[in-house]
Amino acid sequence: MVESNPNTQQYSPNKKIPNLWRKFRRWLSRLWDKMQPRAQVRKGAAIGIIVAVVILAVGFGIFITPGFPGILDILGGVVILLIIAGLIWLAVAILLKLLSIFPRFIGPIGLIALLVFICVLMQLGFPTQFALLLGLVLGLAQAFLGGGIAALFDKEFKFATWQKKVFVGMAVGIPLALNILLVVWMVDKGSENHLVVLKETPVAVKPLGIANPGLPGSHEILTLTYGSGTDKRRREFNEEVTLKTETVDATPFVKGNKGWRMKLREWYWGFGFEEFPVNGRVWYPEGEGPFPLVLIVHGNHKMQEFSDPGYSYLGELMASRGFIFVSVDENFFNGTFMAGLNGENDGRGWMLLEHLKVWREWNQAEDNLFYNKVDMDNIGLIGHSRGGEAAAIAGSFNRLSHYPDDATVAFDFDFDIKAIISIAPSDGQYKPAGKPTPLENVNYLVFQGAHDSDVSVFMGERQYNRVKFTDGNYWIKSTLYSYRSNHGQFNTVWGDNDWGLPMGLILNRKTLLRGDEQRKISKVYISAFLEYALHGENEYLPIFRDYRYARDWLPEDIYINRLEDSNFITVSDFDEDVDVTTTTIQGGRISGENLTVWREEDLEFRRWGTKQNNAAVVGWGEPEAEELSEKVGVYSILLPQNFRSENPIADDTLLVFTMAEADEKPPEPEDEEKDKKKGNAGEKQEKILDDGEEMPKKGSEDKAKKGKGSDKAKEDKDREPVRLSIELVGIDGTSVKLPLERFMAVPPIMRTKFSKLKSEGTIWGKDYEATIQTFELPLTAFAKENPDFDPSRLKEIRFVFDLMPKGVVILDNLGFTRPRF
């Protein structure tokens, strides 16, 4: 045997790898050096780009005319473009220099970590621009902090110059202070400085003299859960279920959801799409019944944080008032960070109807504890967020024989759904056969919070506008808009942070109602609506005609409500054509006098498109006007000659319209000098536009600037509420005019501030969204003011802007109705 020499280095393959790596790097470096262009080539390339920039500046600069005399006007444009190009060059040079410093400061590992930090912020849900800025600032701050601490512990630090010691001290102190300030900022709940102060003079309404519907009733409350009995995540839907149900196959409604993430979901829940459970929490009154049945379903939330217990406060209330109330479990439709579903909202609506099928079976089964206890002729559906859209989808599917997107799936529902309530719903996440969800012949209620930072636009207004009444029965549809309500506090599990943690730490939560206050709104309105629609308690109907009847039962806040019933006769909803002088009803005419704004347009959300609802926008006066003009603005609607004979006006007839203050000012007056300048600019602009291309619309720039931030909120502090008069004219010329505020004041512009960020427009859009209020004016009030005026001979309705010197309003849905109760 040969003995090894201890002085001889043994072969190790691991030691050969670094040598190979160094050789590869040297080879790559030599190759890169060979590929580098020579200095004169790089200089030529730079000159080529610079020449192109100069040509571009000269070529387009001649069309930018700053208004200098003669040839200087053209040269001025060229110089301006060259200056802009120079400033951009300087900014890019500084940026590239900084980018070359950062890698040397933090090293390649630190640079990669910084990029990872920014990417993680994006993945957590922070908006891209915010994540980039926050990640860069915080990442570099931690780099300075870490580098400074390392320098402090360096044994050579005590020999450093005083300048270096000061710099290291700043490198540690400033980032440390920044971190402390960040923690304080994130813990802080925000500010209320933007909130609108209501300046209206309250108009007294006669008390209804009825009990608060938000208070418990007289029934004893019983509870149970039902489900498949195999849920491995929750005992209440496993061994603790009182009634067992069969699973259902949801695969037709979750198409396209495939891959390893769906396997992850299946592992978590213990079942796949073919075996979705029919799970529910039930609160029901003790007694024989039968009792109306109401189902409520949550929306999208973290699937591990179960949402269905969050409506127990409603379950207890409604059971005490004689309803069977079910909180439907659809957490398995929800998502998680790694495994969310797409295009599943039709499935959420379909699942509600599957629950109703189970209840129909139980009500008919003699051995079931709910035998003959369910009033299947009076059913209500409630949904929150995506569940709010799902409730409307269920109402639409209920009348169909087949699934619109796959007619091989047959439906057999046809339940007597009398009421649908949507809480801050989404809309358009599912479109049956590619069309907006239709809904007809059902009582519909939707409410929304203005400070909802999740569903931050009033999407439910779209569905409200699509609800139609066609069967001759009496139906209503209503909205309620609450200024300081958010998305989550209608569910006790979701709470006041609409984004969750950690993203929700940027939200402005100080402005919100307390959770118990906000839930008073849902208690009062949901209870009153179900009492009216399912119990036939007509005494609660005025609450939906006018929110002021419920003011004593609601938290202190600003509210806006709308109502339309099936007795409503439309005169003009401004959706019929593009002619601003025509009414919806054939033969009517619209005219204007001394108006500075007059157009019809699709009302916009604060972001994400429009409300799919045209309205008239009418303005008068000038931006700086402080006194009434001698020429009073008037917007007039002339009824067609046959209107009175075909639609007799009775003593109890109400004139109805919806109105809001527009977030704009009357335009500046145009003088001749301005016209000339605009004309010259227009002529030169036409030179660079292709033939037939549309010129920018007048006022489009001002429109784009609407609602851009706190500046407008400051202006609103001194803003007076809109005031105007309504004048009615008979066919004999007799007229009577009353101020609108005698009936109800026009709501103020309700600014929102969703976050603690200084600027949030890129996330939420405008700080205001036009939300219109329904006004119902009894014609008897005008007859009482002038006994010579006969409402049955009404010919013309005039909006007279004679009570304030300037303003712009939105007008919609003008017509007449006769209230049933």
Image (cartoon, grey):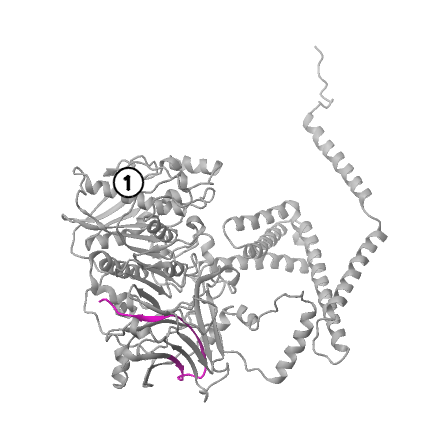
x and y percentages locating residue 662 in the rendered image: 45, 72
| Magenta range | 798-821
Q: Is residue 339 above or below residue 425?
A: above
Does the stretch in magenta take in 255?
no
Give x and y (percent) for residue 657: 35, 71
Residue 381 position within the rendered picture, expressed as x and y whole percent measured from the top left: 30, 52
Residue 776 higher or lower than 69, as above or below: above
Residue type, numbered disc 1: Glu
Q: Is residue 557 visible?
A: no
Q: Residues within 10 Å of mark 1 (few under 14, many from 20)?
A: some
Q: Residue furthest left?
A: 288
**Quadrant in which the N terminus appears:** top right
Relative horizontal placement of residue 454, taking residue 794 as reference (left or right): right
Q: Quadrant of residue 749?
A: bottom left
Report helix, strand or loop for mark 1: helix
Q: Which residue is mark 1?
A: 236
- Residue 757 makes an appearance in the image: yes
